[in-house]
Image (spheres, rainbow, N blue to C red):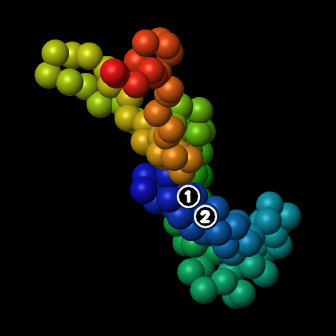
Amino acid sequence: MLLTALTIIQVFSSLAIIALVLLQRGRGADAGAGFGAGASGSVFGARGATTGLSRATAVLAAVFMINSLALAWLGTRPNTTQTETLLGEQVSETAPVPASTTPVVPAAPSSPESTTPAQ
């Protein structure tokens, strides 16, 4: 359950990071913005969206990295389920062994006295 939730968070955070990086302008666009060419094409002004998008990208990158570490830690843990008894002993829960389908034949008596009829 936890592994599934972390995987879903990982996918959504990675897609959001990709979208935010594609929305941001490159470093080369700043040279044109210095002469007034960049402010007319942006919705938030010359510098308004840059700070918000950069901060959102940094937050999502931190979520992505922490989530990656959590997924790696969960992936290296052993998959056995263990419970602790009242005395503090570790008891591992395993699946029950299925019963065999071959019929059990009783063993023949080994002593010759028991096979002779009584007279």
Badge nearest the viewer, 2 or 1? 1
| Closer to the camera in the image, 71 or 118 | 118
Quarter of the image for residue 54 reads bottom right
Residue type, numbered disc 2 = Val
Q: Is residue 22 left or right of residue 80?
A: right
Q: Is residue 31 left or right of residue 96?
A: right
Residue farthest toward the front in the current orientation of the protein: 119
Residue 14, position in %: x, y? 64, 62
Residue type, numbered disc 1 = Thr
Residue 110, position in %: x, y? 50, 15
Question: In the rendering, which numbered label is found on residue 38?
Answer: none
Residues under numbered marks 2 and 1 in contact, where contact means CB atoms less than 8 Å apart: yes
Question: In the rendering, which numbered label is found on residue 11?
Answer: 2
Task: Please tell me whether mark 1 sits on a helix, a strand or a loop.
Answer: helix
| Closer to the camera in the image, 73 or 97 | 97
Assess disc 2: are there few (<14), some (14-19) or many (≥20) residues with their C-alpha within 10 Å of its C-alpha.
few
| Closer to the camera in the image, 45 or 115 | 115
Q: Residue at x 51, y 46 (%)?
A: 103
Q: Is residue 118 left or right of residue 15?
A: left
| Closer to the camera in the image, 101 or 71 | 101
Q: Residue at x 56, y 80 (%)?
A: 44
Vertical order, 38 against 51 (above or below): below
- Counting the numbered discs, the total is 2
Q: Residue at x 71, y 87 (%)?
A: 41
What residue is disc 1 on?
Answer: 7
Vertical order, 116 against 98 (above or below): above
Task: Please tell me whether mark 2 sits on a helix, a strand or a loop.
Answer: helix
Assess disc 1: are there few (<14), some (14-19) or many (≥20) residues with their C-alpha within 10 Å of its C-alpha.
some
Residue farthest toward the left in the current orientation of the protein: 86
- Quadrant of the snapshot with the N terminus: bottom left
- Quadrant of the snapshot with the C terminus: top left
Q: Is residue 54 left or right of residue 83?
A: right
